[in-house]
Image (spheres, rainbow, N blue to C red):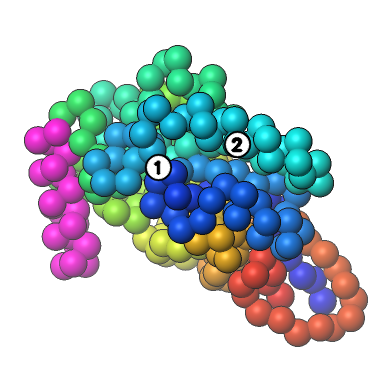
Amino acid sequence: MARYRLAFDLHTHTVFSHGKGTIEDNVAVAREKGLKRLGISDHGPGHALYGVRRGRFAEMRAEVDRLNRLYPDIEISLGLEANIASPSGRLDLEGGELAMFDYVMAGYHFGAFGEAPLYAASLAVRNWIGGIAGRWGRKLVAANTDLVEKAIYENRIFALTHPGDKGAVDIEAVARACAARGVLFELNAAHGGLSEGDLALAARCGVRFLIGSDAHSPERVGEFGGAVGLALRAGIDLGRIVNLVEEDTGDGAEGGEGAGKWMS
């Protein structure tokens, strides 16, 4: 019987934004679960409520470097979950700040206002109402899609986080943009927003996938919830999920999702 586990988890949060644990707390859990690489990806500074303060970037970098020296059995990377908010595609990172990070992910969040605060606030309200009602109009979907596509094309993004979660998008258009730019399409263990049909369509567009725990507490690091089951139901070749590895135990053991393991 095949068993799957995460080789690495690059979407985790800490007390530097609105997570509940320190960077070292996340590292401890990642090591316990046998991860070979851990990414710290707190929210970008453009988020009004829980973005990392720019003045703390150097502190985070120094802590990650210290922990890499202390724990040679795991690679610890400093990333950032930048905010998609600006109509021009610009993220909430300044040019000189990029060198401090090993990778940058990006996602659409409520509470980030970018270069056009009134537009961003209006869009957030419409998406919030759409989420409650369970439907988005064509113009709203087009606006969300345009925002995300521009961010993909205007920046060097490692992965697009929880696509379609806070605001519905044209999955085919966004997936084609990700494929063209080599941006990974996240299967988020904490947020929904994607159906089996959405994933199947994204796969046909040529994207590769990344499972992210989106852990906001240390114990959730390395978990992937129902992401693998969703991928299987969508007919996706699990080999397209870059951080999923297969272990063939041959012992017929039973197990379930969570804690970094999934049995098929």
Q: Nearer the viewer, residue 172 or 67?
A: 67
**Number of the label disc, if any, that sits on residue 43:** 1
Residue 56 against residue 216 in the figure, above or below: above
Mark toward the viewer: 2 or 1: 2
- The residues colored magenta run 117-138
Q: Nearer the viewer, residue 258 or 210?
A: 258
Q: Which residue is at a point 16% across and 67% down the rendered structure image?
A: 133
- 133 displayed left or right of 3: left
Residue 166 against residue 148 in the figure, above or below: below
Q: In the image as oriented, which residue stretches furthest toward the top?
A: 96
**Residue 209: x percent and y percent?**
58, 49
**Residue 188: x percent and y percent?**
49, 57
Residue type at mark 2: give it.
Answer: Glu
Residue 241 against residue 59 in the figure, above or below: below
**Residue 94: x percent and y percent?**
38, 19
**Residue 233 falls in which quadrant of the image?**
bottom right
Q: Which residue is at a point 40% across and 42% down the rendered structure image?
A: 43
**First reached walking from the N terminus: tag 2 or tag 1:** 1
Quadrant holding the C terminus: bottom right
Q: Which residue is at a point 46% across and 58% down the rendered structure image?
A: 20
Q: Nearer the viewer, residue 143 or 156?
A: 156
User: Is residue 118 rendered magenta in the image?
Assistant: yes
Q: Residues within 10 Å of mark 2 (few under 14, many from 20)?
A: some
Q: Which residue is mark 2?
A: 63
**Residue 61: x percent and y percent?**
57, 30
Dominant secondary-structure state across the stretch colored magenta: helix
Residue type at mark 1: give it.
Answer: His
